[in-house]
Image: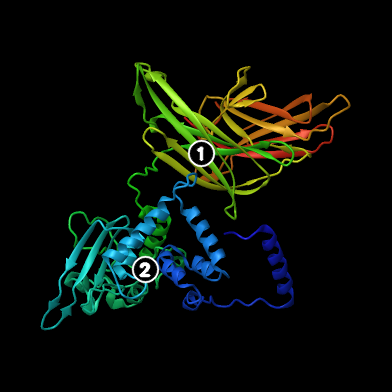
Amino acid sequence: MRPKAGIVLISLLVLLWISRAVPVRTSPYQVFDEEKLYQRLAHREKIYYLSLRYLLNEYQKKQYLTLPDRKSRNEWIDRFWLVLDPTPTTKKNERKIEHEERVKQAKVLFPSAQPPGWDDRGEIFIRFGPPFSRERTWAHIGRFEQRMPGEVWHYRNPEMLVSFTDRQLCGQYTHNYVPGGEESWTEFYNDCNFGKTARMILEEMQNPYSVGKLLPQHIDSQLTDSRNMLNPDAIDYIQCGDLRKDLYPVLTKHVGDEYRLADRALANFHKHNQRSDFFHFPELDLSMTAYFDITCFRGGPGKIRTEINFEVPVSELSFRAAPGCRQAELELRVAVWTLELEKVASAEETLGLTVRDGKEYLLPHYIPGQVVVTLPPGYYRFGIETVDMNSQKRGVFRVSTCISPLDDKLALSNIQFARLIGETEKLCRFMKGNLIVIPHPLHLYRKKTNLKFYFEIYGLKLDREDFALYRVEYSIAPRGKIRQGPLLKDSGTVVSSKIGASGFGPRQPVYLEIATEDLRGGPFQLKVRVTDRRTLETVEETANFAIYE
């Protein structure tokens, strides 16, 4: 949960005052006493926390354990699950349901008389779910070595092996954090030194006699980069490429800088493997592709008309057969919360699409849609979903954005890119006054197709006859640099113009179309500046779009 802006400002002022009086000295990071804070919890809270802590990073653990009472901790848990909900606009939280089901299964499949009620296999099961394959490794007693019985689990997402050993021969399996020596579950694993951590690899690299050794791509959660502190799924594991052919292939790879490789693999793992990847919902298909943007217009005193615009490819929809035609149905859902995760608004819209048999060529490539909510200015979290009602496939998006005030002084709305703008007398969901503005949230235009956009001006100064005078300037410039021979240079503005205009009332709608023949393919920035010709006040707004050839 983010701090409020007022608290941040006060804290900043206090820090500035202290910095003038006393020299600032950096102190080493102090790890909080988790065990001491844990003992403050009631018995039921302890049991729940032991399973929940697998999903928490160090900062979340400290935040939860330092709350003063059970009520505030329960509210914190409710907000925590809301953030992880894969379908934020529905009441059902599949992530929470699966986690609680895994905890129940861990107690049954991998029981332990000691807290938390399961052994280390239960921890891995709760974190990552059931493995792709599970193999027993038998005990071995020889003249020179002995190995305890164990298990090795193979996962495909992420691709990894996790090994366990029954050290006490009592059915309580422990995770092999250092899988070398007597607890190795296979001679191959022991002989190839898979127990090496990144720090051990670094030490061997400094040893001239170790050059050319085969070293593993091994990541250790305790001894590698501090970024592990932010990853609740950080555990010791071996990351490998392809285990489908054989459970025991050669997992080593000869590289020049193994320590750098380990840290790079760690960073990639954190970046590309989100925690949601480790949770599987067989009946929940979140693969729908959809595009959206959020545009804001004045909606009344102290209110902002917030439009969430959609474009969904028709190829993402499933059509059901009907007499002489096929039909598709798409539902658009939006839920809005404050930063403290208090729900403030929700809305939904249902779109239908019918195509007659033999007329499939008339289908558009995209279906436009729009959901509107009215909000006071502020910073909000949006949960956005698109749902194919025939197949239940959906796209889920989360975004946080600031809704800026549009008060009585000169102001501009957001720029709304459009596929079509024109005058009409028929009522439809895309009406703005007597204009129909079909949104284009993808912001991608084919070359030689006119760029279309709409915006509104507020707070213009009027004369006695309520007449306003203003000037609109726009410019288009490439985002980034262009190559000229061996050099990269700023290309500057490629399109610009000024338009003088007038109208009745302090609010003026404006729509423009700009030819794109002179624009090369790539991303661009559109800047619009409006000047009140009576007061000479100016305001401007920018937005990004792209051209493809």
Foreground of the two, 400 or 12: 400
Badge 2 local density, few (<14 within 10 Å), some, or many (20+)? Answer: many
Q: Secondary structure at mark 2?
A: helix
Q: Nearer the viewer, mark 1 or mark 2?
A: 1
Query: Residue 308, how many percent across, how many down?
Result: 56, 37
The residue that label 1 is drawn on is 333
Q: Residue at x 40, y 43 (%)?
A: 286
The reply to whether discs 1 and 2 touch (Cβ–Cβ < 8 Å) is no
Query: Residue 497, how many percent across, how many down?
Result: 68, 29
Q: Is residue 206 left or right of residue 163?
A: right
Residue at the bottom extreme of this rendering:
143
**Quarter of the image where the N terminus is located:** bottom right
* Amino acid at pointer 2: Tyr
Residue 284: assigned label? none
Q: Where is 144 relative to 376, above or below? A: below
- The answer to which quarter of the image holds residue 194 is bottom left
Q: Is residue 356 left or right of residue 14?
A: left
Does the image show residue 280? yes
The residue that label 2 is drawn on is 259
Foreground of the two, 330 or 263: 330
Q: Earlier in the sequence, mark 1 or mark 2?
A: 2
- The answer to which quarter of the image holds residue 417 is top right
Q: Where is 172 relative to 523, above or below? A: below
Query: Residue 216, how many percent across, how many down?
Result: 28, 67
Q: Secondary structure at mark 1?
A: strand
Q: Where is 75 relative to 165, above or below? A: above
CA separation in Å, label 1 and label 2: 46 Å
Does the image show residue 546? no
